Amino acid sequence: MIEWISFLVSTMIGTASPIGKCDPIDGPKLHWSRADRKQLRRDIQDAAIEMGASPVFRAYLDAVAVRESSMKGSRWHDGGKGLGAFGLNLESHADKWPGTDEHPAFCNPRASTVVVQAIAHGCLDKFSHGTGALVAWDLQACFAGRFECIGIEDECTAEQQDRTTSAICSRMEARGFGCYEPIRKKDLGPLVPFNLRAAFAGI
């Protein structure tokens, strides 16, 4: 009975597959089947491989997407501020996407993956202090905007540390990497040029 209801809801809002689509701002959420979520995960990993990402950064991408959306890439986050598989903040990351179509582009798994790569490059440029590397924990703190927690600075509260740890550590370990695994520039793959990101995403 529940499967039929889900099918009818997905039919009513006009989609057989939710991949690359966004939930309505007001209204029923798109239905995600197990197969859809597996396909989204493959799409993210395929995009990362094409960008030249190493296994450790691909594990990080997988961990973050599970944490942020449970691989349901149509979802809104933080009361409509964030969008897509990685919960990308529309305002904060508009500068990493060509054009003004972050909504709906951030619901596209390839688009959101290339934006996360750009975020990670920016984090390493700003916070690695010439080493070209951050550990996964620090990269997650940067991704989440908890910049005061990078290197566990004095301003980082215990609550903020717990949020970062719970977001990434166990998930990285489940993927064969440690919470304090270094992620280097070469792990991210060469930065996809700004003007080629939409083409890379197929948009």
Image (spheres, rainbow, N blue to C red):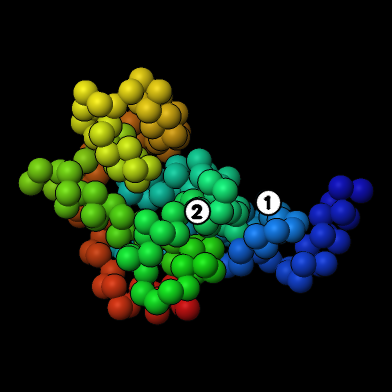
Choose between 17 and 154: the one closer to the eye.
Answer: 154
Q: Residues within 10 Å of mark 1 (few under 14, many from 20)?
A: few
Q: Is residue 108 above or below residue 117?
A: below
The picture places residue 24, in percent across and down from the top left corner, at 67, 62
The picture places residue 42, in percent across and down from the top left corner, at 51, 58
**Which circle's residue, 2 or 1, is located before the other in the chain?**
1
Per the image, label 2 sits on a secondary structure element best described as: strand
Circle on res. 52? none
User: Residue shown at 57%/67% (left/top)?
Assistant: 20
Left or right position of 3 against 37: right
Q: Amino acid at mark 2?
A: Gly
User: Residue shown at 10%/43% (left/top)?
Assistant: 129
Tell me which corner region of the image, top left, top right, bottom left or bottom right, holds residue 17.
Answer: bottom right
Q: Amino acid at mark 1?
A: Arg
The furthest residue to the top: 158
Q: Which residue is mark 2?
A: 82
Tell me which corner region of the image, top left, top right, bottom left or bottom right, holds residue 178.
Answer: top left
The picture places residue 109, in percent across and down from the top left corner, at 50, 63
Circle on res. 34? 1
Residue 169 visible in rendering: no
Q: Is residue 76 above or below residue 109?
A: above
The furthest residue to the left: 130
Query: From mark 2 to mark 1, how far is it between C-alphas?
Result: 23 Å
The reply to whether the C-beta atoms of the residues labelled 2 and 1 are less than 8 Å apart is no
Left or right position of 89 against 96: right
Left or right position of 97 against 151: right
Q: Residues within 10 Å of mark 2 (few under 14, many from 20)?
A: many
Left or right position of 94 against 12: left
Residue 137 visible in rendering: yes
The picture places residue 132, in percent across and down from the top left corner, at 14, 48
